[in-house]
Image (cartoon, coloured by chain):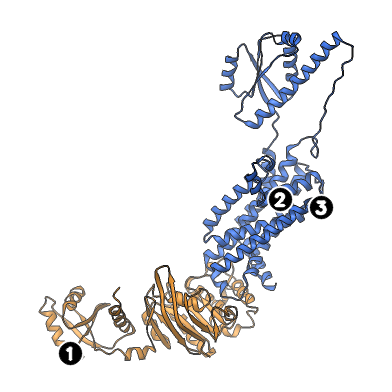
Amino acid sequence: MTPISAENIVMNYGKVKALDAVSLKVEKGELFGLIGPDGAGKTSLIKILGTLLLANSGTAEIEGMDVVKQYQNIRRQIGYMPGKFSLYQDLTVEENLNFYASIFGTTLEENYDLIKDIYKQIEPFKKRRAGKLSGGMKQKLALSCALIHKPKVLFLDEPTRGVDPVSRQDLWDMLQSLKKDNITILVSTAYMEEALLCDRISLMDHGKILATNSPDGLIANFDKPLYAIRSGNSFNIIKKLKAYKHANSVYPFGDWVHYTDKRDTIDPLEIKTYLENNDTPNVEIKQIKASVEDCYMSLTSKNQNYEPA
Amino acid sequence: MRIIRFIIVKEFIQIFRNPLLVLIILSQPFIQVLLLGTAGGDINYASVYVVDEDLSSTSREIISKMKGSDFFDIRGAALTMDEAYKVMEYKNINLIVHFPPNFEKKLIKEHSSKVQLVTNAIDAITASLTYAYSSEIIGAVNKDVAIKWSKKSLSNKAATVSIPYSYWYNRALISQYIMVPAMCVAMVVMITILLSGMNIVKEKEIGTMEQLNVTPMRKTHFIMGKIIPVWIINIVLLAIGLILSSLVFHVPVVGSLWLVFFLSGVVMFLLLAVGVLISVISNTQQQAMFFTFFIIMIFVIFGDFITPIDNMPSWGKAMAELNPQAYYSRMIHLVITKGSGIKDILPDLLKVSGLTFATLAVSLWIFNKKD
């Protein structure tokens, strides 16, 4: 039985297409990432799968149960952690946990094993009100509350947004460790580098899934040689390269400009010479391995070619 | 049921974590009942100016009778009406009594004569009361004069019919007996709607509603868990209000005190349902707050509090049929002041219950549709 499966989900907000025929399958025990910028449709998809939102069309099943017809049963099996901290700020850590446990008809003691790795980090503050916790600790409390009833499937909507780098790393470590309990996890994020921490990912943009693969598989599929180019003036490089007749894609990447060519094999020197002949001195060029972000950029440019916005 | 209990416990913890809120809620019976119960006093005073162009014994008798009454305060006399009008314009005079020349002569000769009463109608209630009281005094004098003259001409005994009257259910016409229970009603209406309305919207606004929606908790359980604490709080507030009204204003509860609490408990569920409806429609606490004030205003205006419903046009009466405060106010007065039993208020109680189920059903329908 597939823990999460979605077929042709369409979601419209007025004229805006938030989800455009999205299909997805997540396997048991997988840590699956939905990667995409804001507005890609990640939150809508998670809410539909989490029985919080009704899709305009399409079907979805969680653990073999339909999200519309059997939502009551699904809710016993899933944990959900929204992007915004939404626990009771005026209740203590302990009271929040006990409250959510009792709503599910269980107790903190009964499921202590599952959450102890996470909870023991905030246990010293269990008498503190949730509103007075630091961002990282709030995150841990929210995750504990989402896990308090031993869910089979866990949804996390942008759990690392606005969280400091150390807490972000903590959170990913915690998610990795949950895999040993055979919990299927669907997590969304706008940070491309976090994709590498997932077993498989779907790259999303404008309500569409552009590609679904393991991070390594995705990178291996990057078919064109990728060059990183640098000189004193990135803006000038981008302008000149975009005017270059063989250019396939040009985009800034930190201090560097990433470039792919329309031809399959090229000589980097040719590009260097072209740029230096066009008022861009001291060009540094090297071939590099693609990252997830490069894959995303190449996929979105293809996507836009299909359907010019 | 177990889940409802957990929500109730959580609600009480949250309420008592908010000391300012607790203070404001608990101060309500003291402020509303004590302060407003005292401030809403009787009209027991009217200032009078006299223009006596007759200067006869009859006119003086009327003036001296007015002087003798506690109600009238004769501030002075003017020679002409123009002068008196000026006084009314610049000073706070409620009434001008004008005796035209030959007032007494006409009365004796023609058996009829006229006194002019000019009331200052800026305050309509005082004006009508002043008019009624002064006509009564003049009427009494009129009767005396008639008897005096008939004595002279006819036999020594003239038959007169006097009409002594008493105000039933409130013999001394003490306004606090009406005002204080009415203030208790107004307080319960306000706090119940406000607390229950804010309560659910708050969960929407801070996002906990969404978190609760992914749990197997049923919406009916959630609503029950949210409104029962408010119900308990209001029963306590009502008890405080009634204790104050008995200790401070000595308002007698003629009917059964249990019935007062029973009918209040029933009406409170309707008020809670209204609060739930507001919170289901609103998305933010600000919206809910405005909505609540708007509704409370209408409830008060059509609630037998400012204008008696019996004096309203038919559409106003129809609106009162949907108004929890109108039912509550009517039933409370029936039981507290008149001493009615459950049989007398049963039709109202049934209507209130019907409205409660209707409101809750609509709220749940919207709630399920929206979230």
Q: Are marks 2 and 3 on the same chain?
A: yes
Residue at numbered disc 3 = B343
Q: Secondary structure at mark 3?
A: helix
Q: Amino acid at mark 2?
A: Tyr
Q: Are marks 2 and 3 in contact (CB under 8 Å)?
A: no
The chain containing the residue under callout 3 comes to B
Q: Residues within 10 Å of mark 3 (few under 14, many from 20)?
A: few
Q: Position of residue A287 (x, y in %)?
A: 23, 88
Quarter residue A259 falls in: bottom left
Q: Position of residue B129 (x, y in %)?
A: 69, 29
- Decide if residue A178 is on the left or right side of residue A239: right
Q: Are marks 1 and 3 in contact (CB under 8 Å)?
A: no
What is the distance, in whole Å, between disc 1 and disc 3 at their CAs? 98 Å
Q: Earlier in the sequence, mark 2 or mark 3?
A: 2
Q: Quadrant of residue B370?
A: bottom right
Chain letter, orange: A
Q: Badge 2 is on which residue?
A: B328
Few, some or many residues within 10 Å of mark 1 (<14, 14–19, 20+): few
Q: Closest to the observer: B318 or B229?
A: B318
SS state under label 2: helix
Instruction: Indicate which label's residue lies in the foreground, 1 or 3.
Output: 3
Residue A158 seen by the camera: no
Picture disc at residue A266? 1
Q: Look at discs 2 and 3 and give the one toward the viewer.
A: 3
Same-subunit check for callouts 2 and 1:
no
Closer to us: A110 or B343: B343
User: Chain B, which colour?
Assistant: blue
Percent position of residue B351, x then y = 71, 55
Q: Is residue B160 left or right of residue A236?
A: right
Q: Chain of mark 2?
A: B
Q: Amino acid at mark 1?
A: Ile
Residue at disc 1, secondary structure: loop
